[in-house]
Image: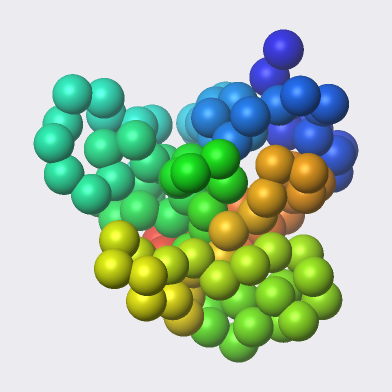
Amino acid sequence: MRTAEGSAALPGMTADDRLAALVDALAGEPGVAPPQPGRRRFGSTALTVDGSVFAMAVGGALVLKLPRERVAALVAAGAGSPFANGSGRPMREWVALGSDDALDLALAREALAFVGGR
């Protein structure tokens, strides 16, 4: 079952399940597009707004793009960890929420607003 209502992930939800829940919850937002499997580029398995990635499932974590100050605050509070690119360099505007973290639709909406410039 997919859910993005409330603030807690269902026990056993994978990052892919959590991303699917966000796809369902944010599908009606202007400019939002679901993952495009089969496309061979960064973000092919990500949620986008106007063509730019704002949420994705990577390595068992739900990853969101937020302002660097917000990412730093979430990491400092223990709500997530820095997301690193393929070479291991942390990306300042990306936060990885582990599988045990709550699925927070409000954070996903923040990422949508940040990337979408709304």
Q: Position of residue 101 (x, y in %)?
A: 78, 49
Q: Is residue 113 visible?
A: no
Q: Is residue 101 left or right of residue 83?
A: right
Residue 37 lies in quadrant: top left
User: In the image shown, does 26 or 21 lie closer to the viewer?
Assistant: 21
User: In the image shown, does 7 or 99 lie closer to the viewer?
Assistant: 99
Depicted 107 relative to depicted 11: above or below: below
User: In the image shown, does 8 or 114 lie closer to the viewer?
Assistant: 8
Residue at 58% across, 46% down: 61
Residue 26 lies in quadrant: top right
Q: Position of residue 76 (x, y in %)?
A: 76, 81
**Farthest-out residue, bottom:** 69
Residue at 72% across, 33% down: 4
User: In the image shown, does 61 or 6 lie closer to the viewer?
Assistant: 61
Q: Position of residue 56 (x, y in %)?
A: 45, 45
Residue at 29% across, 68% down: 87
Depicted 118 relative to depicted 43: above or below: below
Instruction: Please tell me how many numbered marks the rendered image carries.
Output: 0
